[in-house]
Image (cartoon, rainbow, N blue to C red):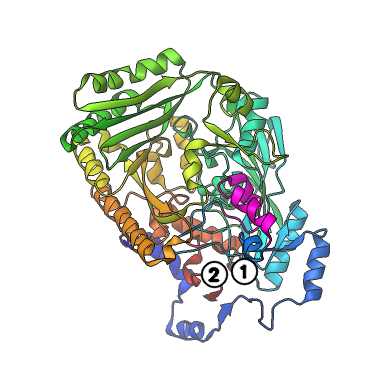
Amino acid sequence: MRRRSLLKLGVAAALQPLLCTSSPAGAAAQAAKATVRRVRPGDAAWPGAAAWQRLNDAVGGNLINVDSLFAPCSEMKPGACIELWRNIRNPFYLGDQPGGTEVSGWLDAWTPQPSAYAVRARNADDVVAAVNFGRDNNLRLVVKGGGHSYQGTSNAPDSLLIWTRGMNRIALHDAFVPRGCPDGPLSAVTIEAGALWIDAYDEVTTKAGRYVQGGGCASVGVAGLIQSGGFGSHSKNFGTAAASLLEAQIVTADGRLRTANACTEPELFWAIKGGGGGSWGVITSLTLRTYDLPEHFGYAAGTIEAKSDEAFHGLLARFVDFYATNLFNPHWGESVKIRPENALEISMVSQGLDDARSAAAWKPFFDWARDSSGYTVTDPAVGAPATAREWWDVAARRKRGSRAMVSDPRPGAPAHHAWWSGDQDQVYAFLHGYESIWLPAALLAEDRQARLVNALFDASRHWEVQLHFNKGLAGAPAEAIERSRDTATNPAALDAFALAIVANGGVPGLSSLPYFSAQAHRHARAVDAATADLEKIAPEAGSYVAESNYFNDHWQRAFWGANYPRLLAAKAKYDPDGLFFVHHGVGSEGWSEDGFRRSRA
């Protein structure tokens, strides 16, 4: 796989206190220390039945066995097996299984593996009991809420899973003041760790007429998104989701339930805001600022196909200039796809614009494409057909005849549980390759647009390139940028007009067969080749931790940039023994790939 450039010296220097000593004698003493190894089932130190029973009693009988997702089929249970296959493309069903993950794995990286046991947490006390048990018995801990991690961080074999899915209560506040802080009250919402963003939007927007900045994908867990930084459809106006965090309840490695905000635990609070999920403890609840709801949310969609490579290059040039002139502002977010078959697919959303203003914004571009002989325009649509309050209202959409959302069809499922049809392809997908790169806004300058267009065209010869405009904050209001600056997210996001994503995948299980394995590896190499073309115009631009390359050797710089040394210091303070480990998480450098072995500093 493709590798990234070297770490910055500042990051390497920050690692020194944890990974080496300052004298030959100290180095010899460190080398003599035994490797720390977490225990697995079958080891002499693995807890016995009586110990597990005590944990079960402490969590009210909610210690459960975890089977693989396909256990009903391998165990010849036909009814349960049929039910599994009926729901395998339903993200809510997958999240409701303790061994389920929304993505089914990554080529040469990971496949879902069940934990030895799981604590089905109902409250913070259950989480405290599980953390203490895991620490005292030297177990590998895994934390899962939504289970949406592309990098497989919410599952691991031979582990104890702390499963927060059942903690999903939501409470609105008219005047919230973070504990110990002198700041004035703010409108806010407190969301427990197992809630999904569709739950939050239903309570905050559909029912209460407010707005909370969250994720675009409805089935993503709230806690995981905040810890990853969090970009949603309207981040170009409201900033990252993490930037709206006012307070968090979190159980740290010492078993303490802490209230973290800017006044009580400022470094832990800052680290939670984009420092990566699973590294800091177990979030039990989050309190987020809410905002006045814009009157309108809207969209723009359509596909423009070029009849030649030359025409497609011209289409990209026209669109880049059109975006820089008409759409590079807080109103427009979401994405376009630049496809190898010389097509530009538009799937963008807006906030604060009515039908007339939305249509006026796009009219010059669609008129140009229709009037040009080199293009075919398919299904153009622009508008704001309903109020913003109805954006996530499944029933209201159904009355209008909209099929943009797919409802959870299971009997008894919450009526508001639905996912965007455009997200269907990623549900239970098996990833072959994935990369993201922030593209600096300086590339939109008139004298640099040609380089951007050439790179996008060249990259699209290898694979589809997506430009997610809402995942770059350049063009956002100054206040939103400053709030987002006060998070752990790579500062490159603040200066980027978009996040470029190149990704592909296929059907789970087929990659083990020779033909499909060769094809999958070709796909992975195509992602690398497309990314290399983009990196020519944005070297060391950074990558979004939640949507990134599993094999990035220099993830510290890519994910967090200049913020990494500060994150490493927070990790040393709150989790010095590395109880909370995830692949490419803060402080994971000294651990084996599976998180079971480290050399203690």
Q: Is residue 573 left or right of residue 584?
A: right
**In front: 439, or 304?**
304
Task: Please state the horizontal and vertical placement of residue 380, each as a whole percent of the image.
Answer: 37, 23
Q: Is residue 83 magenta?
A: yes
**Magenta-highlighted residues:** 77-101
Task: Pick out the residue farthest to the top.
Answer: 356
* Tag 1 and tag 2, C-beta contact below 8 Å: yes
Label of residue 179 in the image = none
Task: Please state the horizontal and vertical placement of residue 132, each as a whole percent of the image.
Answer: 72, 65
Q: Badge 2 local density, few (<14 within 10 Å), some, or many (20+)?
A: many
Q: Is residue 224 left or right of residue 463?
A: right
Query: From where the camera sits, is residue 76 visible?
Result: yes
**In front: 316, or 111?**
111
Mark 2: which secondary structure? loop
The residue type indicated by label 2 comes to Gly
Q: Residue at x 50, y 66 (%)?
A: 588
Label of residue 595 in the image = 2
Quarter of the image that includes the N terminus:
bottom left
- Quarter holding residue 53: bottom right
Q: Is residue 148 above or below residue 590?
A: above
Task: Tell me the residue that label 1 is attached to.
Answer: 140
Q: CA distance from mark 1 to mark 2?
A: 7 Å
Q: Is residue 96 left or right of residue 459?
A: right
Q: Is residue 363 above or below residue 218?
A: above
The residue type indicated by label 1 comes to Arg
**In front: 7, or 182?**
7
Task: Please state the horizontal and vertical placement of residue 500, each as a whole percent of the image.
Answer: 35, 43
